[in-house]
Amino acid sequence: MKEKAVLKAALPPAAEPINRLIQEFNKLPGIGVKSAQRLAYYLLRASPEQARLLAEAILSVKQEITLCFTCCNVTDTNPCPICANPERDHSRVCIVEQPQDILAIEHTHAYKGLYHVLHGAISPTEGVGDGDIHIRELLERLKSGQVIEVVLATNANLEGEQTAMYLNRLIAPLGIKVTRIARGLPFGSELEYADDVTLTRAFEGRQEL
């Protein structure tokens, strides 16, 4: 409430609906007050049809998107298009922290297997344990015996490394090859922001743990 009061005090006089829209935009990551104001006034000038399409797109994401029951990626079909694709290599599973990491990897065309999305990483300092991310679903997948390699593509930071080592301890006894994408990614970086060349080299140079 205090932050909201501070924001309202910082806003110039405007109609309440405009201020409400600015406040909502300002809650988005990377959107400051100035950017929120520009977006709000852009929508004010936009046609009713354009505003309606934006509102419908936002609502449809919340109403229609679910998690793939195989890989836990976000999808509007089950299984998701990647899991349902017979041309993918179903014997390899790449583990990532977030759905947007899949977009980054797919853009390189360096990997043709399947994925598993954890939706986070183990972080004791933030109270995130192994039961808070989708590890149980991963272990259930691996029981099928179809997977011969698991590629650990968690982020190259402390939480990502902790998660990778924990998963290796769980998966290695199953007789499945466990690899980690190579150190083409600088420590402390996030997969989502890596360029294509860096990601391609990281996949080509992955090593068995």
Image (spheres, rainbow, N blue to C red):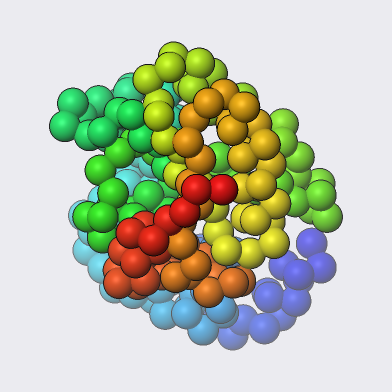
Q: Which residue is painted at 81% across and 49% down in the image?
A: 124
Q: Position of residue 85 (x, y in %)?
A: 20, 29
Q: Is residue 13 visible?
A: no
Q: Which residue is painted at 75% across and 51% down in the image?
A: 123
Of 94 and 180, which appears nearest the observer? 180
Q: Position of residue 189 (x, y in %)?
A: 55, 70
Q: Is residue 97 left or right of residue 90?
A: right
**Residue 101, picture quadrant:** bottom left
Q: Quadrant of the N terminus?
A: bottom right
Q: Is residue 147 left or right of residue 85?
A: right
Give the answer, above or below, for where 197 lies relative to 89. Answer: below
Q: Position of residue 203 (x, y in %)?
A: 36, 57
Q: Is residue 119 visible?
A: yes
Q: Which residue is painted at 26% across and 55% down in the image?
A: 110
Give the answer, above or below, for where 190 lies relative to 181. Answer: below
Residue placed farthest to the left in the image?
87
Of 24 and 109, which appears nearest the observer? 109
Of 205 and 164, which appears nearest the observer? 205
Q: Is residue 123 left or right of residue 106?
A: right
Q: Is residue 109 left or right of residue 54?
A: left
Q: Which residue is painted at 33% across and 29% down in the image?
A: 91
Q: Position of residue 40 (x, y in %)?
A: 43, 71
